[in-house]
C-alpha cells in the first residue's frame, strides 16, 4: 500500500500539477493539506474519475485536508478532539480497507508564527491535543499512519541552513520538544528509519519544502517538515519511504512536494 502526503497549497491552483503526479505516482492513498476550499468547492468528481474515493475537511480560503484513496474508506472522522471551539480544518482520519486495514490520520499542523504570540500558543496546544489523541489510538495496537505537514523541523540536519530557522516556530526548542514527545509515544519517523544517515550536504531528495522566495529551490535551500509517523504495527510493514523532490521544479508547483511510504499491506 503506497501512502503519500502532499501539501498542495490550494486545490484550485494546483489541480493540474496534482493530477499529473497522481497519474504518474499512482499512490493508493494521497493525504492532502492546504486544499484551501470548502467541502462543496472541492473537485471530488475529478478525482473520482481517476479512481479515488474522496473525503474532505475543508474551509474557505485557508487550511483544509483531504483523503484520496483507491481503496474503500471507513470510520471517517473530521477534526482533532480536545477543543470544541477550534473551527480550523486541520485533521481528517479514516480506515483504509486494503488486504490489511490501515488507519490513516491526515493533518495540517499549525505554523505558529510569529512566535511568541497567540499563533504559537495555538500550535503548542494543538500538538498537546494530538499527543493525547495518539495515546488512545496507539493503545488499539493497529497499523496507524499519522501523516501530513507538521510544520516541524525535527533536527538541524533537516534544514539546509538550520541557523536561519533558530527563531522560527518550526524549529524553536518547545516545538521540537513537543514533536519528540509525540514520537516517543512509540511512533517511527518513516523517512528517518529508511534514511538514518544524512550526508554532509543533502540533496533535494532529503527535503520536502522550499520557499518561493529568494530562489530557494534552485539553491536547494530546503527543509523537511512533511512527515509520516508510524505505529509499531505499521512500522513492521514499512518497505520504503521517499520524497518526490523533482515535482518542485515543474510548472506552477506547490512549495511542498509529496513524501510517500510503501507498506506491505
Image: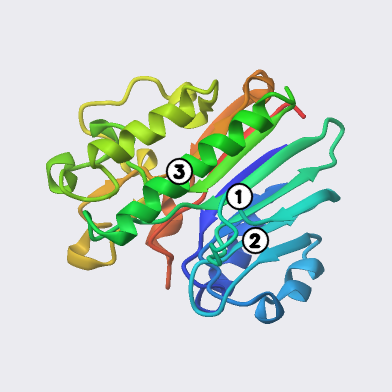
Above or below: residue 78 compared with residue 81: below
3 and 1 marks in contact (CB < 8 Å)? no
Q: How far apart are marks 3 and 2 (CA)?
A: 20 Å
Relative to 165, 234 lies left or right: right
Q: Depth check: 98 or 89 in front?
A: 89
Residue of label 2: 66
Quarter where residue 203 is shown: top left
Residue of label 1: 106
Quarter where residue 177 is shown: top left
Instruction: From the top left corner, tell me how far across and down residue 80 is, in percent.
Output: 60, 51
**Could you tell which of marks 1 and 2 lies nearer the N-terminus?**
2
Question: In terms of secondary structure, where does tag 2 sit?
Answer: strand
**Which residue appears at 58% of the width and 76% of the height?**
37
Above or below: residue 150 compared with residue 134: below
The 10 Å Cα crowd at callout 3, few under 14, some 14 to 19, many 20 or more, is some
Which label number is shown at residue 127? 3
Instruction: From the top left corner, tell me how far across and down residue 88 is, in percent.
Output: 53, 65
1 and 2 marks in contact (CB < 8 Å)? yes
Question: In terms of secondary structure, where does tag 3 sit?
Answer: helix
Q: How far apart are marks 1 and 2 (CA)?
A: 8 Å
Q: Depth check: 160 or 153 in front?
A: 153
Relative to 155, 61 lies left or right: right
Amino acid at each position: 500500500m503506497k501512502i503519500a502526503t502532499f501539501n498542495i497549497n490550494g486545490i484550485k491552483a494546483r489541480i493540474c500539477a496534482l493530477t499529473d503526479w497522481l497519474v504518474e505516482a499512482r499512490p493508493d492513498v494521497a493525504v492532502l493539506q492546504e486544499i484551501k476550499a470548502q467541502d462543496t468547492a472541492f473537485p471530488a468528481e475529478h478525482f473520482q474519475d481517476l479512481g479515488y474515493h474522496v473525503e474532505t475537511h475543508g474551509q474557505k480560503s485557508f487550511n483544509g485536508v483531504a483523503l484520496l484513496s483507491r481503496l474503500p474508506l471507513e470510520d471517517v472522522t473530521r477534526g482533532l478532539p480536545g477543543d470544541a471551539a477550534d473551527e480550523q480544518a486541520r485533521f481528517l482520519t479514516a480506515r483504509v480497507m486494503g488486504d490489511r486495514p490501515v488507519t490513516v490520520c491526515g493533518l495540517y499542523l499549525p505554523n505558529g508564527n510569529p512566535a511568541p504570540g497567540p499563533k504559537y500558543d495555538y500550535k503548542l496546544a494543538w500538538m498537546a491535543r494530538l499527543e493525547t489523541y495518539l495515546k488512545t489510538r496507539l493503545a488499539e495496537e493497529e497499523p496507524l499512519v499519522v501523516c501530513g505537514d507538521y510544520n516541524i523541523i525535527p533536527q538541524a540536519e533537516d534544514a539546509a541552513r538550520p541557523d536561519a530557522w533558530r527563531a522560527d516556530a518550526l524549529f524553536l526548542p518547545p516545538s521540537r520538544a513537543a514533536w519528540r514527545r509525540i514520537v516517543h509515544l512509540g511512533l517511527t519517523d518513516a523517512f528517518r528509519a529508511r534514511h538514518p544517515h544524512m550526508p554532509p550536504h543533502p540533496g533535494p531528495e532529503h527535503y520536502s519544502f522550499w520557499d518561493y522566495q529568494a530562489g530557494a529551490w534552485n539553491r536547494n535551500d530546503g527543509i523537511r517538515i512533511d512527515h509520516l509517523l508510524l505505529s509499531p504495527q505499521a512500522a513492521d510493514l514499512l518497505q520504503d519511504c521517499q520524497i518526490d523532490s523533482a515535482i518542485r521544479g515543474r510548472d506552477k508547483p506547490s512549495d511542498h512536494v509529496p513524501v510517500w511510504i510503501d507498506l506491505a499491506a
